[in-house]
Image (cartoon, rainbow, N blue to C red):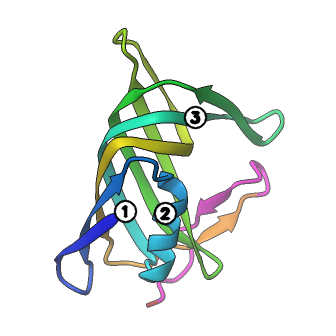
Amino acid sequence: MKYKLLNGIDNATYALVFDSGDEVMNLLKTFANEHSLKAARFTAIGAFSGVDLGFFDFGIKDYKKIPVNEQVEVLSLIGDVALYGDDSKLHAHVVVGRSDGSTMGGHLLKAVVHPTLELILEESPGYLQRRMDKETGLPLIDISEPEKR
């Protein structure tokens, strides 16, 4: 993965270009932690050689894994970054297009790029913190907390 700072230091905007074979979520999480991102949003297009989608099952309070073991186009990938403790946590959803024109989508659990993924990441002007939600068992963004900088 390569990246370039496009705009500013505060509320920075980055272009990240992933190479064939890169695993998106691991590299993006590492990038967010290394750049101390407290809040950000991102969008991307490109292609994957394979992807694991997730569908949250409230009955078991976990994601049902949906493997897609084929070359797919990334039609839309959107997500955010927020802190969970001192760690950057990603939340991303993706819609992928298959060779027959059908689509699949869900929570992005894991994806391997092939041949490229072009992602624009925009740092938000505020601070977001995730807190464990007892009902779902998920770390959800809590906007009731006072803003920290």
| Main secondary structure of the magenta stretch | loop
Q: Is residue 126 left or right of residue 146?
A: left
Residue 1 - label: 1
Q: Is 54 situated left or right of 100 in this image?
A: right
Q: Amino acid at mark 3?
A: Leu
Pinpoint residue 132: horizontal percent, then vertical percent. 72, 63
Q: Residue at x 51, y 71 (%)?
A: 30
Distance from Cα at disc 2 to Cα at disc 1: 8 Å
> Label 3 belongs to which residue?
53
Q: Residue at x 55, y 60 (%)?
A: 26
Whether tag 2 and tag 1 are in contact, CB under 8 A, the answer is yes
Secondary structure found at label 1: loop
Taking depth in this image into account, of 148 and 95 the one nearest to the observer is 95
Mark 3 vs mark 1, foreground winner is 1
* Secondary element at image label 2: helix
Residue 87 inside the magenta-drawn segment: no
Residue reaching furthest to the top: 100
Say whether residue 138 is left or right of residue 145.
right
Q: Is residue 140 above or below residue 35?
A: above
Residue 143 part of the magenta-drawn span: yes
Which residues are the magenta region?
134-148
Closest to the camera, between mark 2 and mark 3, is 2
Side (left or right) of 62 relative to 66: right
Q: Residues within 10 Å of mark 3 (few under 14, many from 20)?
A: many
- The residue pinned by badge 2 equals 27
Which part of the image, by quadrant, shows the N terminus? Answer: bottom left
Amino acid type, mark 1: Met
In primary-sequence order, the first of circles 2 and 3 is 2
Q: Position of residue 66 (x, y in %)?
A: 64, 28
